[in-house]
Image: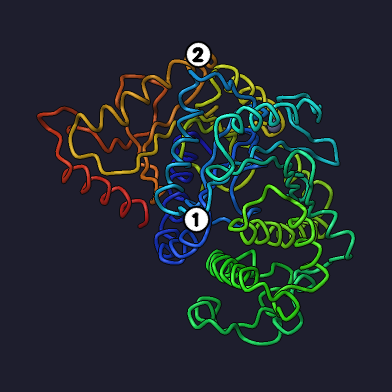
Amino acid sequence: MKTQEYLSEYLKENIIESETLHRMKQVIGEFGSRAPKILVTKCIDGRVHGSKAKGYPPTTIRFGRTDGNIVSTEKNNYSFWNRIDSIVNNAMCNTPEMPAIFIAYMHRSDKGFGCAAHHNNEEESYKAIQNQTREISKLFPSDKLYVLQGITNTDIMAETLIFDESIRISSKEIINDFSLKNLSDIFHKGFLKYPIKDPATARFVNFKTPEELCSGEMPLFHADFQTSLSMKSFLLLEISRIINENDFSSQKLVQPDVFHAILSVLQKVKSLPKTLLASFFYQSFWNISYAINQINKLNSMTESEQLKIIDHSEELICYGDGFELIPRNKTILVKTGRGDDYEALQVAKKVLEKNRAKKNPEYSKIIHINIEVSGEEMSWEDFNENISSKVHTMLRPVDEIFGESVSILTTYSYRDQKRFYPIRTINDNRIMYSTNIIDKINSSLLFSSMALKSREALYATDKLI
Ligand SMILES: [Zn+2]
């Protein structure tokens, strides 16, 4: 596949995903209103991409990403601290009874495919996240921002959460301790047999019983976006109800051993605000289900198929924000906020070149720069300030690290929509995608927000046909 064709296919997939997101907006909104505001930082590694393993639907979680999760915590690292201020203020204004959550993740692998930025050294990986959490805790009290650490096992996507640098809850250990083999093993028997009582959830999962959703080679519980999303919202609601009613012995949702295993660890964490207990319970429970699903998936594969999942197989580099809908292990994700984007891009380049040497694809090296905005662009000044000028500034480190030997896709997206709109706002031969949303309206004289809106709509419909 040639570059132009590759990009066209890539943008089309994005539009389809964004349509699904749009259809499920209401359910995501419900989930969001029950969940705490959460910010996660992690590595640019494509294998730790996405929020699926955490049980948070796209748009309900914010990310920071740098090579090996290394950041400068100097106060002049504006984008790093600003991301934290944004989430803390979001919680203060919208969920005043629940502090925001910050989790810094490292990643590791039992099979030896660890973090490239730390040369597979787990102690170094841990130091990077410890540096962050310690510096942040100095500035924010835990009733404003609850800070903890996490580890992702990229082989099976199991997570370990580390509270107060000492108390650990590990999905993999719980899976092993109770010999959990199937998704249905983690639910209470009484829950599995009958259709879900909540009418909206029942409708979204086509009136199937939880047992039916959990069975088969590709259980719908994780494989189908709509099912998975409605189960997330339902489980967060139910778990919050059980935890808040404090009537643990009569709960009929979670398998009792698993229930007590999760709860007993969380209850040991003295620093944990009561209002966050349910959401951490939910996150651990979801991750156990996700890891079981990954383990079963891997077990059904040949060794070379397994390698595609557990080793790097990213196809391009994404630089900026708004890439949440892209599947895991498809792209290496670099965000601003390290204090030094050059270093992050350098690591990304190395990983990409290694992957390309293995596969030797027809399309060229690609960097996708996306700027995510949260509101509408009402004037050309808005567009310049929020989008074009940022793209131009971000092109500079790309020039430095990649020179001429790269194809660049420049786009913007809206935070709640996650649809990439291609633009070309600067004369640069490396920007090669043919569509340009801002073409012929790129000045204060020519621009109008109506014109931009209609260009965006036209682009999306064209792509969908
Ligand atoms: Zn890494």
**Viewed as shown, does residue 204 lie left or right of 130?**
left
- At label 2, the amino acid type is Gly
User: Ligand 1: which quarter?
Assistant: top right
Which of the pair 167/225 is nearer the observer? Answer: 167
Which of the pair 245/462 is nearer the observer? Answer: 245
Mark closer to the observer (2, 1): 1
SS category of the residue bearing label 2: loop
Image quarter for residue 394? top left
Which residue is the site of mark 1?
A: 97
Residue 464 position within the rendered picture, expressed as x and y whole percent measured from the top left? 37, 56
Residue 336 position within the rendered picture, expressed as x and y whole percent measured from the top left? 50, 27
At x 80% / y 69%, what residue is drawn?
Answer: 182
Q: How many marks?
A: 2
Q: Which mark is residue 403?
A: 2
- Image quarter where the N terminus lies is top right
- Image quarter where the C terminus lies is bottom left
- Of the two numbered discs 2 and 1 on the same chain, state the one appearing first in sequence: 1
At x 21% / y 42%, what residue is drawn?
Answer: 452
Image quarter for residue 213? bottom right
**Viewed as shown, does residue 89 lie left or right of 224?**
left
- At label 1, the amino acid type is Glu
Q: Residues within 10 Å of mark 1 (few under 14, many from 20)?
A: some
Residues at marks 2 and 1, CA–CA distance in whole angstroms: 50 Å
* Residue 318 higher or lower than 239, as above or below: above
